[in-house]
Image (cartoon, grey):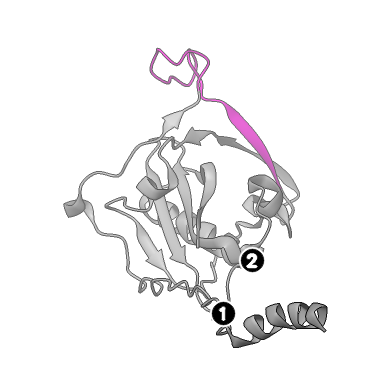
Amino acid sequence: MQNKLLFLAPLALAFSLPAAAAPTPTVVRHAPPRPAAPPRGKEAGARVVGTHVVPHPDRPMHPTTNPPHQVVYHNAKTNKDENHVVVVDRRPAHVIDHDARIRVVRRGYHSPHNWEHFHQARGGWWHAWGITSWDTVGTVTCEAANETTGELFPVSEDRDEVAWDDTTVNSVLDQALDDCMTEAGGAQCSPATPSCTFQGY
């Protein structure tokens, strides 16, 4: 009888203790997407100039004595290869996103021009940046470059309730290329390197 009482005592103690409160789930509150805003004009200052990739970095770019490096894109619409100058922006993503001449956009832009040869195919952005889930991406910033002057044209978009996909990222790049084309005065425009950068959500 004594053994039974010793066995029941811990059970009685356990039932008499208050139940532990369930952990409160952590709610992450994200800032709403920025409203669309056109880029500021020249009153905001000169556009940032990227770096041309040249054989002799210690010398200024020159079309014959120090020509810029080029990459080839195949344009499926024209069935021709296009040579484009490489212009690098070495700024981190969060710095580009505060460029004085940046354009902020919202989902839904459709370019009137053919930039598809610069697009990443489905899954291409994942592969290029090691993105495992679009849910982890908050802000996408893409840049085009004037191949002659090196001027950069950044465009940024924040995640909305639909989240990201390859087509939406490509449309941000399209806007940057269109902005460059508008100001380039006939010069050739192409994606900067890197063409798009991604910030966490």
Q: Amino acid at mark 2?
A: Thr
Callout 1: 10 Å neighbours few (<14), some, many (20+)?
Answer: few
Identify the residue at horizontal 51%, vertical 78% (top origin).
Answer: 24
Residue linked to disc 1: 20
* Label pair 2/1, CB-CB below 8 angstroms: no
Q: Is residue 1 depicted above or below 167 in this figure? A: below
**Residue 185 shows up from this direction:** no
Instruction: Give the residue furthest to the front.
Output: 2
Give the magenta-colored segment's residue range.
54-74
Q: Disc 2 and disc 1: Cα gap in Å?
A: 48 Å
In magenta segment, residue 68:
yes
Q: Disc 2 designates what residue?
A: 167
Name the main secondary structure of what is drawn in magenta: loop
The foreground one among 29 and 199 is 29
Q: Is residue 174 above or below residue 11?
A: above
* Relative image position of residue 48 (x, y in whole percent): 32, 41
- In the image, what residue occupies the spot 69% across and 81% down? 9
User: Quick one: SS at disc 1?
Assistant: loop
Query: Which residue is pictured at 50% across the width and 16% down the height?
Result: 64
Most extreme residue toward the left is 43
Q: Quadrant of the N terminus?
A: bottom right
* Other residues around mark 2 within 10 Å, as few (<14) / some (14–19) / many (≥20): few
Q: Position of residue 138 (x, y in %)?
A: 50, 63
Q: Secondary structure at mark 2?
A: helix
* Residue type for callout 1: Ala
Considering depth in this image, is 200 or 84 the residue closer to the camera? 200
**In front of the other: 47 or 36:** 36
Which numbered disc flags the more N-terminal residue, 2 or 1? 1
Placement of 201 over or under 68, stated as above or below? below
Asked where in the image residue 146 lies, by quadrant, the reply is top left
